[in-house]
Image: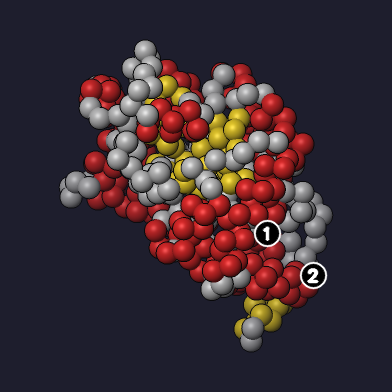
Amino acid sequence: MRKRLLIFIAGCLYYSGAVAVARCLARLGERRLVILNYHQATGGDLCRHLLYLRQHYRIMHIEAALEELYAPEIYSHDRRTPLVLTFDDGYRDNYTHAFALARQWQIPIVVYLVPGYIESGAHFWWLEGKHLVQHARVPVAVIEGRTYQLTVARERAALADFIDTRVRYASSVAERERFLASIYTELAVSSDGLSLEEEAALPLSWEQVVEMEQSGWVSFGAHTMHHPILAYLTDEQEVQQEVEACRGVVERHLGHPVRSFAYPVGQMQHIGEGAMEAVKRTGYCWAVTTRYGFNTPRSHPHLLHRIEVDVSQHWLVVAAEAAGLWGLFARVRWLPPVRRYLTNAGKKQASTVR
């Protein structure tokens, strides 16, 4: 019911002309760059999103878009607002689906990679709770003093939530991996029979990464080596290593400098005080957060804004998001369903990490 209401509101904004007016006003004002933030490419209608965005925005690679944003002398005869499509983490469906669409419609995209997961055989850690419980081969598990009856749906969900919480707040990558290894043993997890959904959520391979870049339609940025939440790491040297090693590995595989970075999770409380300095020391020109908003020449180059979107959203909602109307309406007191939607979307992003 709520989803239908949100689509109705977005449809009113679009078909009343409000979205078109907002796009026009954006072109008349200060330079603006819209950066959208996707994760997985399947599970919705990415094709419809791209067709709409290609028609109404000037979609660019992130390096070219940011060079233009910060250089007043760079001028384009195309007056549409520049827009960048980013995909965090490097899921396999970024290759099978997003890349296929990018080539078909000639739309540039950028993917932020986590090299420590590529060809490791591991699932991204924020998916492990669900995966471990789903593939457990024991009916009962005792984890840190609590007994979980895995034949009971409520108990399975509780264990998955516990695993997620423990790995999310780990103070080091080593601690996180030790805990996950112990859970694999305790649950006697089977690696057989992955679902199509799980297959799509596996990391890319380096062969796929190279093929994507050689096409000219996909560029890559860095997203830390192992995707820890940087603010939760207790060792400053580990923060620096996560930021720096990631760049080195990606550059070795691609054969050229990597200039942009995406903070894991990306809100200020997840970035922490030392992460931005580590990003600067490593030599990244730009870094993107998940803080809502648009970018102007006054935006901090290492704290750039992005707008969280998802392939499961209706294209009308994405149209309102890209134009800035969704965030505006979310602040109106008499539209609590929209406010709740955006609040819940933010919580979902923080809880699933991606």
Q: Is residue 272 left or right of residue 150?
A: left
Residue at left offset 70%, top offset 36%: 255
Q: Which mark is residue 188?
A: 2
Residue at left offset 61%, top offset 59%: 242
Residue at left offset 82%, top offset 54%: 192
Question: Earlier along the polypeptide chain: callout 2 or callout 1?
Answer: 1
Q: Residues within 10 Å of mark 2 (few under 14, many from 20)?
A: some
Residue type at the position of mark 1: His
Residue 292 vertical position relative to residue 170 in the rendered view, above or below: above
Q: At which x and y percent is residue 40?
A: 58, 42
**Any part of residue 345 in sight:** no
How far is mark 2 from mark 1, CA to CA? 12 Å
Q: At which x and y percent is residue 156?
A: 62, 68
Q: Is residue 139 left or right of residue 334?
A: right
Element under disc 1: helix
Residue 52 vertical position relative to residue 232 in the rendered view, above or below: above
Element under disc 2: loop
Q: At which x and y percent is residue 92?
A: 68, 41
Residue 345 vertical position relative to residue 251 in the rendered view, above or below: below
Q: Which residue is mark 1?
A: 131
Residue type at the position of mark 2: Ala
Q: Is residue 19 left or right of residue 223?
A: left
Q: Quadrant of the N terminus?
A: top left
Residue at left offset 19%, top offset 46%: 332
Q: At which x and y percent is residue 42?
A: 59, 37
Residue 160 vertical position relative to residue 3 in the rendered view, above or below: below
Q: Nearer the viewer, residue 74 or 95?
A: 74
**Any part of residue 305 in sight:** yes
